[in-house]
Amino acid sequence: MHALGPAPGCALSVLLLLVASWRGGSTAPLAPPEVHSLQGSWRLSNGNGSLVLGGDVPGCVHTALLRHGLIQDPYYRFNDLAYAWISLDNWTYSRDFKTPFDIRTWQKVSLVFDGVDTVAQIVVNNVTVGRTDNMFNRYSFDITDVIKEVNAIHVNFVSAVWYAAEQSKNHQAYRVPPECPPPVQKGQCHVNFIRKEQCSFSWDWGPSFPTQGIWKDVRIEAYNLCRLLYFSVTPQYVQNTQQWSLKIELDFDVISSKPVAALATVSIPELQTQQTFTVELRPGEGSTVLLVNISKAAALETWWPRGHGNQTGYNMTTTFIAEGGCKIEKLSKVYFRTIELVEEPIPGSPGLSFYFRINGLPIFMKGSNWIPADSFQDRVTSKRLRILLQSAVDANMNMLRVWGGGIYEQDEFYEICNELGIMIWQDFMFAVALYPTDHSFLDSVRAEITHQVKRLKSHPSVILWSGNNENEAAIAYNWFSIPSTKKSVYADDYVTLYVKNIREIVLAEDETRPFITSSPTNGVESAKEGWLAHAPYDTHFGDNHYYNYVSDCWDWTTFPRTRFASEYGFQSWPSFSALAQVSSEEDWSYVSNFSLHRQHHAHGNDQMLNQAALHFKLPQEGNPLKNFKHSIYLTQIMQAQCIKSQTEFYRRSQSEIINGEGRTMGALYWQLNDIWQAPSWASLEYGGKWKMLHYFAQRFFAPLLPVAYEDKGALYIYGISDLHTDYELTLRVSLHDWGLTEPVCTLAKEGVLIKGGAAVPIYKEPISDLLKRCGNCTRQSCVVTLSLEGEEELSSPSNYHFLSSLKDAVGLKNPQLLASVSQEGDQFQIILEATAIAPFVWLDAGNIPGRFSDNGFLLTEKRRVILFYPWETTSAKELEKSLSLTSLTDIS
């Protein structure tokens, strides 16, 4: 199909004439398509029929069994192992339904599944109408000749575990590693042979729950002449004419033996734009493209990422009227913004830059990596999505990377990101594995990629497509021990899958966004090297993933001065209140079987304590429960402090080149959220509760921030700004004695120029001079605090720099923390009082959902007001009862 072009100035009269002529013919206007949802209650049975129960759609087998009381919470204790049988059985969803329309009046009836998880046979009235093998695809089956007045539908699933094993067994030419996950993950094998959520077979932060179910909408669609399959809108801007336009793509299924004439009208009232097109729809499935020029007289506002402007969108109505009376009207929201991934030479540095320009403005990307919010997607509610994504922007994030081992998220996820200004780096769902490239696998992948790009490309939040997670690195660094004589086989498969198939589809479907083949990658340098760079972790190109649990994370010299840090992180344990929901009293020890079972990263529990022990005294309580709680608290301090050090290093590296490295323009730590209650790299626990790291992120991602570090005995301070304007501010540097509540001394340096969109050095002083200037201070007895202040409430959060490890601190006292709670409208005010300076003050509301305005902070004043924002209704009495206070001096 194709558009014949805009109708002339008399478009409206032409439209009316055409409609009149069609209506004046012998054929009556066609009824709009009938859509009948099959969501709701289905029957669910296992392979031998010994279990029969109700199962909701959308849903999965595990949640159905849980709802009927046939299993406990799958996350409780060791149930991920105890319930492995569920994934090894073959389940069937079935139901009867009456056709809610006269089937004789429709030319075509389709059965449409937006998501089937994963391998299934679809049977309607004892006729197999199709099969599914890809969780990420949409399936449409023609049931015109099968549907009756009363119908029976069966969706017969095959165990994903057995299917993957069978596919691997049938691939006899060569092995496709990895065959199985590491034993510590307690997972299933051969996940790379099935197009399913890769982490559902286990990951180093998540359990193995290979689900079965109809996980998205399923419906009957009946139509005459035409049905709209996809609708997408992407903005385009021509610089030399300064003209915005919209590319509108409509995919139709046309039931006709000859082309059908149609008129399309596009209207955006707020932008004084209306255009009408004459269109020819050709028989079968195909697409029509409309190019709409936006009136130059319109006061158009662009969509901006969070912290850089508004997220303006405009209502658009697209109306299609085809010959014969088929009418389709589509209401949508359209946005205008440009994206560039800039990879160009940098003076004084080998390699190329790697940064994003949005609407012509270079933007430093601040954020994290998103994983599936639950092993069972039907439990991910709108409210849970909203809490997690709002928490991201509340921590001053502007980007999330949707990681390639999970799922393409639900529509509402991207809609919320559009609204909140969160940019999305969208991986395709391939991760830490090699993949087969036989015809059936590639056919399935091609359908998947086409569907997902068509589905997602209208969202302004999506700014990058990325082919996979770490698979270029896996080949380059030979993670799977492939003999050198066989490497070319896997290199060819890699290029076949990600370049000749995925990249080809993306470039054909979406010309408005950049595409990279992998993360990490060397970008255009990888392409030059045949799409597989010999060193994809090269800091002079592309993005970088970096993990180091052995070196001292307070030592900034261990971090790579990369162009873009898209993964880095440290583990911590979630709160005791989160763990208590899925454990019993015997589990409440750092070395219990439960604690070992829940840790899916080899040596992870030891690594956390070893890293913490570099700077903190480890808990030595006689009370095992107290010891466990303090260990949890200490791992959260360690994680937060480590990622603070690393993120501040990346942010201060954005404007300089040192020894050929630098110009870092992104910091996305691993990871934002959790899939269950377990030790992980997340800053948000399962359910959304903020760990200490997330409160730290609120500060270290602040739009205006002073950052201190030491080099060769001197204290350096950089002023970091995401603002669009330069400002003259006051830098305030204070020294506090651990034993006193008032600063020992304060320096206020006025007229400090903080450059917008940059990181610049603003202060330098030898530590020895600083200590002399402040009287009796030593490295062990004092701590540095720093802030930037200006007029009209323009200020940074207070930051700090430790002059020694806190296990060596001298003069720390118990601060005797007290808190009083009162309600202020829909939030709560907590007045915190202390008798001494206190590091890492931690307020915990237990099981009351919500977040604090600040937490995990260095308390340097005697009285401080903190707010609590509840996510559910509670009272001051309940909050005060649940509230606990901890500081570092509580650990002994």
Image: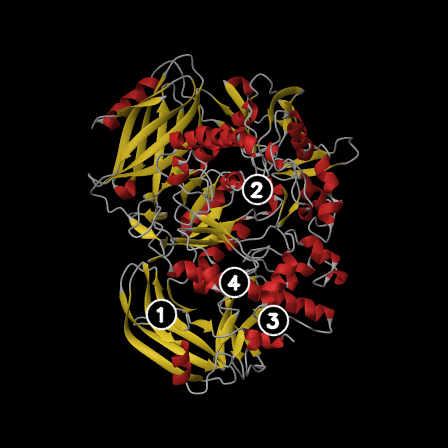
Disc nearer the start of the sequence (3/2): 2
Disc nearer the start of the sequence (3/4): 4
The answer to whether residue 874 of the structure is visible from this angle is: no
How many neighbours does mark 4 have within 10 angstroms: few (below 14), some (14-19), or many (20 or more)? many
Q: In the structure shown, which secondary structural element does the residue marked by tag 1 occupy?
A: loop
Q: Nearer the viewer, residue 259 or 487?
A: 487
Mark pair 4, 1: CA separation: 28 Å
In the rendering, at what x and y percent does residue 44 appear? 70, 35
**Disc 4, disc 1: CB below 8 Å?**
no
Amino acid at the residue labelled 1: Ser
> Which residue in the protein does label 2 denote?
479
Query: Looking at this rendering, what residue extends furthest in the front direction?
Result: 485
Mark pair 1, 2: CA separation: 47 Å
Q: How is the image coloured?
A: secondary structure
Query: In this rendering, which labeled residue sits more in front, label 3 or label 2?
Result: 2
- In the picture, the quarter occupied by the C terminus is bottom right
| Picture layout, residue 142 above or below residue 584 | above
> Which residue in the protein does label 3 denote?
883
The answer to whether residue 114 of the structure is visible from this angle is: yes
Q: Nearer the viewer, residue 315 or 667?
A: 667
Amino acid at the residue labelled 3: Leu
| Picture layout, residue 519 above or below residue 752 | above
Q: Nearer the viewer, residue 329 or 598?
A: 598
How many neighbours does mark 1 have within 10 angstroms: few (below 14), some (14-19), or many (20 or more)? some
**Disc 1, disc 2: CB below 8 Å?**
no
Q: Which mark is residue 553?
A: 4
Q: In the structure shown, which secondary structural element does the residue marked by tag 3 occupy?
A: loop
